[in-house]
């Protein structure tokens, strides 16, 4: 595989890999580093990529695994889920503050989810990937992906409802 073919396949995935990395890691810098590391790994394995049915799913799998490895490593024991690009400028200040508070609460709740559920929620709800793609990336069957997604969403929903009930009493 030459450089042009490689870029044709993986350059469009750069943003998806970045968003997944950003969801799993603490900072933009860590996410950018993760994407660069993944692209380097893919380039080193470029001759083997053609044997995969979906090189894109393989790339996302490597990105996910790399981020999870980073989270487990001792030098990055302070990494956590963060997504700081949330802003709305066309709504009144009160609504912006409420949305910001809800988003911060959602971030806190997401921290309590297992890494697998965080990644699946990211891939399905943020990246809008199909269950089949997520199953391939996560090395799970589609039913297990649906169950994990459902359980993760349920935990998020219950925690949000609990918080809002306490906030209104």
Image: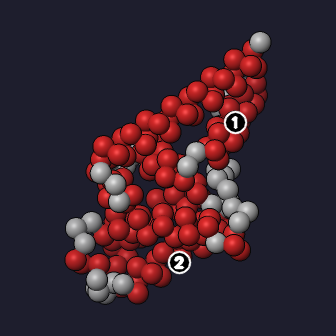
Q: Quadrant of residue 47?
A: bottom left
- The residue lying at 40 percent from left, 79 percent from top is 42
- The residue lying at 33 percent from left, 84 percent from top is 46
In this view, 127 is above or below 160? below
- In the figure, is residue 70 to the left or right of 139? right
- The residue lying at 39 percent from left, 58 percent from top is 138
**At which x and y percent is residue 149?**
43, 41
- In the figure, is residue 37 to the left or right of 62? right
Q: Which residue is mark 2?
A: 37
**At which x and y percent is residue 43?**
40, 83
**Quadrant of image for the C terminus:** top right
**At which x and y percent is residue 7?**
37, 76
Identify the residue at the far top of this view: 169
SS for dot 2: helix
User: CA gap, disc 2 to disc 1?
Assistant: 31 Å
Q: Which residue is mark 1?
A: 105
Mark 2 or 1, nearer chain start: 2
Camera sees residue 124: yes
In this view, 49 is above or below 53? below
- In the figure, is residue 6 to the left or right of 113? left
In this view, 64 is above or below 51? above
In this view, 30 is above or below 169? below
- The residue lying at 51 percent from left, 31 percent from top is 154
């Amino acid at each position: 595989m030459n450089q042009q073919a490689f870029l044709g396949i993986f350059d469009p995935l750069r943003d998806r890999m970045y968003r997944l990395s950003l969801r799993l890691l603490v900072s933009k810098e860590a996410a950018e580093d993760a994407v660069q590391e993944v692209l380097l790994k893919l380039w080193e394995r470029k001759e083997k990529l053609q044997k995969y049915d979906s090189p894109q799913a393989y790339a996302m799998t490597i990105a996910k695994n790399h981020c999870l490895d980073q989270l487990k490593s001792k030098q990055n024991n302070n990494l956590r889920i963060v997504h700081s690009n949330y802003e709305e400028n066309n709504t009144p200040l009160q609504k912006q503050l409420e949305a910001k508070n809800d988003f911060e609460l959602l971030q806190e709740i997401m921290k309590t989810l297992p890494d697998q559920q965080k990644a699946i929620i990211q891939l399905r709800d943020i990246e809008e990937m199909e269950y089949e793609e997520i199953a391939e990336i996560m090395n799970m069957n589609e039913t297990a992906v649906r169950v994990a997604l459902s359980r993760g969403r349920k935990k998020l929903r219950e925690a949000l409802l609990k918080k809002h009930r306490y906030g209104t009493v």
